Amino acid sequence: MKRWEVSLLVILFFVSGFAALVYQVLWMRELGLLFGSTAQAAALTIAVFFTGLASGGWFWGKRAPYFSSSLRWFGFLEIGIGITALSHFILVDTYHQLYPIFYSLVGDSPVLDTSIKALIAVTLLLPPSFLMGGTLPLMVQHLVRQRKDLATQATQFYAVNTLGSATGTLASAFVFPLTLGFQNAYLLAVSLDIVVGSVALFLSGYPATNDKERSKLETFSTTNQTLPRKLTHISPVVISGIAFSSGFASLGIEVIWTRLFSQVLHNSAYTYSVVLATFLLALATGSAIAHGLARFRQFPPLLILGLLLFLAGLATAISPWVFYEVTDGLSYIGRGLGWWDYLFNIAGVAFVVMFLPGMILGTVLPYLIRILEADPRQPSEIIGRLMAADTVGGILGSVGAGFLLLPLVGSWRTLLVLAAIYPLMLGGIALSRVSWLRSAIAVSSIALTIIISGMELHPLQAVTFGAGQNDQLVAMKEGSHANVAVVDTARGGRAIRVNTYYTLGSSQNLHLERNQSVIPLMNHSQPDDLFYLGMGTGISAGAAMPFPVKHVTVCEILPEVVSLAEAHFGEWTNGLFTDERVTIHAEDGRNCLSRSPQTYNLIISDLFTPWKQGTGNLYTLENYQIARERLKPDGVYVQWIPLYQVSEREFGIIARTMSEVFPQVVLWRGDLGSSRSIVALVGHKQEQTLDPNIISERGQEMTEDWTTESLQALLLRLYVGNITASGLFEDYPLNTDTFPYIEYLAPETHRKVQARETRFLIGHEREQLYEKLRSAVPPESDPYLANLNSEQYGYIRAGHHYSRHNLLQHIRQTRRADPHLEVFERNSPQDTWQRISPARWLIP
C-alpha cells in the first residue's frame, strides 16, 4: 500500500475518533437533561455506550474476514454511524414527551424507572455505538497483510484514534458550545463521519487497497516466524482476562482521579475537559509507545508485558502521594490566576499527576496485540475480541469504582486497590505457565498486590475533604455523586460543603437562607403547593413550615446532602424532615419537574454556582419552560441568584431568558447587606399587580406583634424593580440547552474576577444595577406596583437608600452614607429601623 494512502487512512481514523468523542459528550449531556444530571444517569449512559462498542467490536471483528473489502465496509459503518446518530433529533424530542408518561406508570419504583431509562438509552445510543465498535477491527483487517505487522499497524491506529478523541474532548468544551452550539456541533460530527465513510468508499475502489488482491485467510493461517512460539504464546483466555482487568482498572482509576481533581478545581465544563483530555492524551502516548515496543523484537513480549504491568501498578500506587504534594495538601489550584493561566496551571498539575501512570496504563492494552500475533485467527477477530474484553472491563470498572469502592473505602484506598490489580495480572500470567521461576513470580506478584492495597495512607488519611484548617469535621461521606462534609466552621456556624470548597449553606446565614422562602411566600395570595429546586442544608425549605402550606416537594440532586442535612441540621429546619406535608426526592430538580404531573403555586430555585458543570442547565430557556408548565394559573417561579458570583453579563442573560418565558419578571433583594447580596428574579405565569394587603395578612398569620404598615415596610423595602418593563436586557442572548452561555461564560468571568480583570455584581456594581432599574421604571410608573399608595412607595424608596447606606458604611464613607440613612428612617416605620431581615423577625 502506498504511503499517501496509509497517511490518508490515518487522518480518517483521527477524524473518526474526534467525531466519536463529540458524540459521547453530547449524548452524555442530552441524556443528562432527560434522565437528570445524576451519577446513576451518567453511569447508565456510559454503560450503554460501551456495551455498543464492545458488542460491535466482537461482531464486526468476527465477520470482517469474509468481506471482499474491509475498507469498503469501514466506509459503510462510518456512514451508518452518521445516519443512525441523526435519529437523535427525532428520538430525543419524542422521549422528552414520553418519559413523564412512562414515569407516571411506574411510580417511584427505582427498578422500573431505571429499566425505562436503559431502554431509552439503548434505542438512542446502541445503533451508532455498535457501528463505532467495528471501525478498528475493519481498519486493521484492511491494513495488516503480514502477521508481523499486526501489532505495529493496530497500535498505530489505536493511538491515532485516541488522540482524535482527546482533541474532540477539548473542541467540545472550548470551541463548539459558544460558536456552533451543541446541535450544530452534533451535525458537524455527523458530517465528519459521512465524509470519512465516503472517502473510505472511494479508496476501496483502488486495486491496491482492495482485499481481493490478496488472500488474507491464507496469509494468516501461517505461524509467527519472528519468535519461537513458546516465547509468544499464551492462552487467549488469559489475554482476554488481562484486557478485561486492564479496562476495569484504567477506567476505575480515571473515575477516582476525576473525583480527586474535583476537590481542588472550580469544576466547570472546561476543567473537566482539561483533566479528561490529559488522561486521553496519556493513553494515546501509551499506545504510541506500544507501537514502538511492537517493533522491538529482541526481548520476549511476555517479559515486556510483565514489566509494563509492574510499572503500571507502581505508578498508580504512588499517584495519591503525587497528587497530595502537587496540590499542596489539596489546596485550591490557581488562586488569583486569570483565565488562560488558570487552565494551563490545571493542565500542568494534571500532567504531573496523571500523564506518567496514564501513559503506562495506555501501553498495556495495545501491547497485548503484540503477543496475539501468535494467534491463528484473523486480525479483525483478534482486535474485536480484545477490544470487547477491555470495554466490558471498563464498564464494570467505572461503575465499581464510583458506586462500590469509593463509598466503601474512599478515594485514596480505591486508587491503591485498583493499582494492585496490575501485579495481580502479572501473577495470573505467571501462574498460567508452569515453571518454578514463574511460580515464584506469581507468588511475588500476589504478595505485592496485598502490600499495595494495604499500604499506609499517612499523611493522606489525615486529609478531611471539606474541613478547613480551623474547622471541625462533624461528618463526611465520599459518595458516588460527590464528597460531602458537615463542618463546624471557625466562625461559629455549621455548614455543608461539597467537594471541599463549595459551601451549600450554613447556619451562620440562617436568616438569609430563610428569606429565600419568606420573601416569595409573603407575596403570594395562596401558597398551598411549593416546589424547591435544590435543598442544601434544608434551612430555606424549612422556613416554609410555619406558613399554612399544604404540600412541599423538595428535590436535591445529591443523596449524601439529604442524609447529612437530615442528621445534622434539624434544629434549624423547623421539622422539614419529619413534617407530613413534605416529600423529599434525592434526584435532579429539573428532571423532577419535567416528569411531575403536579402543579405548584410557587417554584423556588435555590442559589447555584453558575460556573459549576451542569448547574447552567437550571438557567436555560428550556428549564424555565418546564417550570412554567408546572405552575398553577397564579404560579410564580423564583430564581435566586448570587450577585457575588455573576457579572452584569451573566445576570443580563438570565434575566433576558426568564423574560422570554414569563410575561412578567420582577427583581427582589434577598437582603440589604453591605456588598455581597443575593437577589430573586421572580417570574409570574400571568401578569399581575402586587397586593400589599397580602403581605400584611401573611405576616399576621405568623405573628400578632406587628402592625400592617410595619409588615409591609419590612418586605417592600426589598423590592428592586421591574425587569420586563425596563427593557434593559432585551439585547442579551438567550441561554438555551443548545447555546449554554451561562455554563460556558461564567467560568471565564470567575477567573477574570480572581485576576482582578473584572468584577462581580458586588458593591458599586450592584448599586449601579439597582439604579438602572429604578431609573428605567420608577416605582410610581411600575405596572407591578400599581396598587401601592404614596406611603408604600416610600418603603421601596427606603430600601434603595438603606442598601446604598450600607455600602458606603462598608467602605468607610460615613459622611456620604448618613443622608441615605436619614431618607431610610424618614420613609420607614420607626419600629422597623433596626429590623431589616423579614425571616429574623417572623420565624422564631
Image (tube, rainbow, N blue to C red):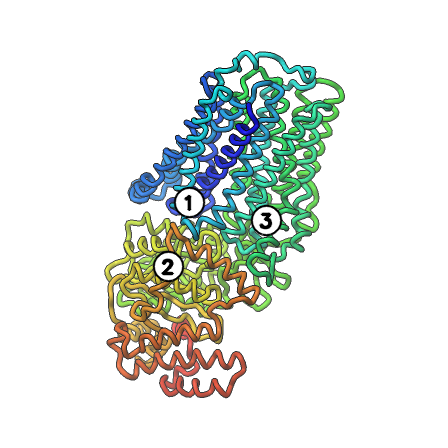
Per the model, the C-alpha gap separating discs 1 and 3 is 30 Å
Assess disc 1: are there few (<14), some (14-19) or many (≥20) residues with their C-alpha within 10 Å of its C-alpha. Answer: many
**Count of marks overlaid on the render:** 3
Q: Residues within 10 Å of mark 2 (few under 14, many from 20)?
A: some
Marks 1 and 3, the one that precedes in the sequence: 1
Measuring 53% from the left and 79% from the top, which residue is drawn there? 811
Q: Amino acid at mark 3?
A: Leu
From the image, state whether disc 3 or disc 2 is nearer to you.
2
- Residue 750 visible in the current orientation: yes
The residue type indicated by label 1 comes to Ala
In the figure, 349 relative to 698: above or below?
above
Mark sitting earlier along the chain (1/2): 1
Using residue 556 as the reference point, say whether residue 373 is left or right of it.
right
Of mark 3 and mark 2, the one earlier in the sequence is 3
Q: Position of residue 129 (x, y in %)?
A: 44, 33
Q: Is residue 52 left or right of residue 489?
A: left
In the image, residue 277 sits, relative to residue 688, either above or below, namely above
Quadrant (top left, top right, bottom left, bottom right) of the N terminus: top right
Separation of marks 3 and 2 at Cα, in angstroms:
35 Å
Can you give x and y, in whole percent of width and height, for residue 813 in the image?
A: 52, 84
For mark 1, what is the residue?
185
* Disc 2: which residue: 733
What element does badge 1 sit on? helix
- The answer to whether marks 1 and 2 mark residues whose Cβ atoms lie closer than 8 Å is no
Q: Residue at x 63, y 50 (%)?
A: 348
* Residue 803, x across and y down, in percent: 43, 78
Which residue occupies the foreground of this view, 419 or 96? 96
Number of the label disc, if any, that sits on residue 260: 3
Give residue 842's quadrant in the image. bottom left
Task: Where is residue 422? Give x, y as percent.
Answer: 65, 33
Residue beneath the point at 39% across and 52% down:
739
User: Which residue does the image show at 60% across and 12% down from the upper left?
Assistant: 222
